[in-house]
Image (cartoon, grey):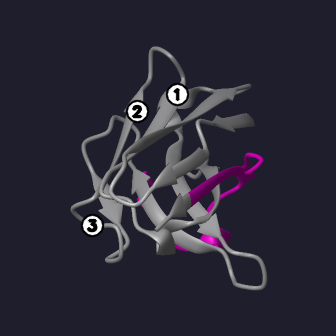
């Protein structure tokens, strides 16, 4: 599975931004997809995850109510809509895929088998 994340950029606090992650190489509809973020010197942090058909989600408490994860299986793409952005959301954002048969929206990075490159999000105050 190859994952290509895009959509990062520099925004101001309170703005919105949508990240995309395009997948190829495996049946996308059988992959749990997740978003993580990382600041230099810190561990990778879970942001959100979505089940195979998009019926189940999980969010980190820090983004709940502000971020929305969604997927379009016809386009092999997962999205992360980020609203009311805060400076503390500044990070490199990574998409990840879990190809286990469990369809579990996990929050631990070890549960994910494939990772895309990061896309940088910078939120200025």
Q: Which residue is mark 1?
A: 77
**Crowding at label 3, few (<14), some or many (≥20) Cα neighbours within 10 Å?**
few
**Left or right relative to 88: residue 60:** left
Q: Which residues are magenta?
A: 102-122
Residue placed most toward the observer, 32 or 75: 75
Q: Which mark is residue 64?
A: 3
The percent position of residue 67, horizontal first and vertical second, equals: 33, 55
Residue 13 appears in view: yes
**Residue 114 x/y as whole percent:** 73, 50
Whether residue 106 is in magenta: the answer is yes
Query: Which residue sits at x=51%, y=70%?
Result: 46
Disc 3 on helix, strand or loop?
loop
Q: Mark 1 or mark 3, which is nearer to you?
A: 3
- 74 to 16, vertically: above or below: above
Element on which disc 1 rests: strand
The CA span between labels 1 and 3 is 21 Å
Residue at 31% in and 77% down: 61
Are the two marked residues, 1 and 2, in contact with CB atoms closer than 8 angstroms? yes
Q: Is residue 20 above or below residue 86?
A: above
Image x and y of residue 121, in percent: 60, 54
Residue 69, image x, y percentages: 37, 46
**Mark 2 Cα-neighbour bin, 10 Å: few <14, some 14–19, many ≥20:** many
| Residue 25 on the magenta span | no
Q: Which mark is residue 71?
A: 2
Q: Determine the CA span between mark 1 and mark 2.
A: 6 Å
Where 26 falls versus 117 (above or below)? Answer: above
Secondary structure under the numbered disc 2 in the rendered image = strand
The N terminus, quarter of image: top right
């Amino acid at each position: 599975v190859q994952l290509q994340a895009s959509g990062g950029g520099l925004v101001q606090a309170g703005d919105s931004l949508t990240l995309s992650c395009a997948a190829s190489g495996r049946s996308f509809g059988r992959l749990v997809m997740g978003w993580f973020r990382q600041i230099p010197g810190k561990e990778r942090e879970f942001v959100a995850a979505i089940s195979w058909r998009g019926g189940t989600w999980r969010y980190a408490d820090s983004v709940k109510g502000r971020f929305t994860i969604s997927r379009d299986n016809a386009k092999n793409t997962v999205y992360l809509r980020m609203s009311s952005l805060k400076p503390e959301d500044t990070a490199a954002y990574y998409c990840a895929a879990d190809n286990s048969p469990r369809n579990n929206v996990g929050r631990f990075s070890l549960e994910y088998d494939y990772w895309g490159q990061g896309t940088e999000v910078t939120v200025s105050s």
